[in-house]
Amino acid sequence: MSMRGVLRLAEVQMRVLDMADSKQHYGTRMGLHEMMTDDNGLVYFKAWAEHDHHSLVLRETDQAGLDHIAFKVYDDATLDDLEKSIIDFGIEVERVDAGVYPKSGRRLKFILPTGHEMHLFAEKEQVGNSLGTLNPDVIPDDDVCRGFRINGLDHVFIVGPDADQNLKLFTEVFEFSYTERVIDGEGNTVLFFVSCSSRAHDIAFGVNPNPGLIHHVSFRLENSQDHIRAADLIGKYEIPVEMNDRHGVTQVKTVYYFDPSGNRNEVFCDGYTYYPDMPLLTWTMDELGHAAFSQSLHVPESFLGVYT
């Protein structure tokens, strides 16, 4: 965890059914900043505290879901090293020139064992977070930190076949740490959580026979007061809520809700600080209530049954 390899989840491109409704949801209500619309009609957003130009991209189409995820790496040399390692792992890699993806440097593009498209890149235009870099401000203006007061894109939970091979790729090639897991009654791992940072996870994988599905995209809040504010706004705007609870896994305080297209979103705060010398935490399916929602101990049927 030297933070000199893969740095963080830096971009998610989601498919939405109605762009106007989606812009209202992610922009006006959640408070993300709309940065641009490209020539193909894709709309780009960032959270206020992020320095990169954007982290969320929306594409209007007739089926909701995930187009791609992209992780930022430390530098261009890291891209070269990882390209060879990914190919040695047995995955084909496509090189994408700088500028093909707006505001972004060159990328590596490939398909994960679970069927998801993933990118790696080292460079993206930085626009700052309004605080400055010389004697920076401590807090932003009210019209900058707005809506749900989201600090940034945090993680995704994706599902598909061969999730164990995702684990192998991320731990052996990308050098993520394996932090938590859920096992079934036969001892088979069905949920995997891995981290490239000091957070409990930066991406999670679940076992599902259908490739390329997403369970949720998650956004990070600063504190419990922002969590309460986000939940109040979700109620105010009558956004469909799945759960407002606390996870046993990762120990975060969470709200799950749905965008107008049926894509599941999460906002959360808190959670433990992870270090690579910490032991792997294991949960069993007979204690799924504690693992998933440790306050109510109730797991809605939709939570492990609805994906896009």
Image: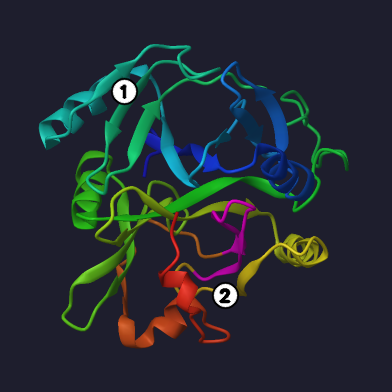
What residue appears at the point 64 percent right and 53 percent down from the top-left corner?
260
- In the image, is 279 to the left or to the right of 229? left
Image quadrant assignment for residue 188: bottom left
Which mark is drawn over residue 246?
2
**Label 1, on which residue?**
79
Amino acid marked by disc 1: Leu
Residue 16, placed above or below residue 227:
above
Give the prevailing secondary structure in the magenta stretch: strand
Q: Which residue corresponds to the image point at 24% horizontal and 78% vertical from the top-left?
A: 184
Task: Please state the extent of the stretch shown in magenta in the rendering.
Answer: 251-270
Q: Earlier in the sequence, mark 2 or mark 1?
A: 1
Q: CA distance from mark 2 to mark 1?
A: 37 Å
Is residue 254 located in the magenta-colored stretch of the structure? yes
Does residue 253 appear anywhere in the picture? yes
The residue furthest right is 142
Q: Is residue 75 magenta?
A: no
Q: Residue 44 placed where, x, y %?
A: 62, 30
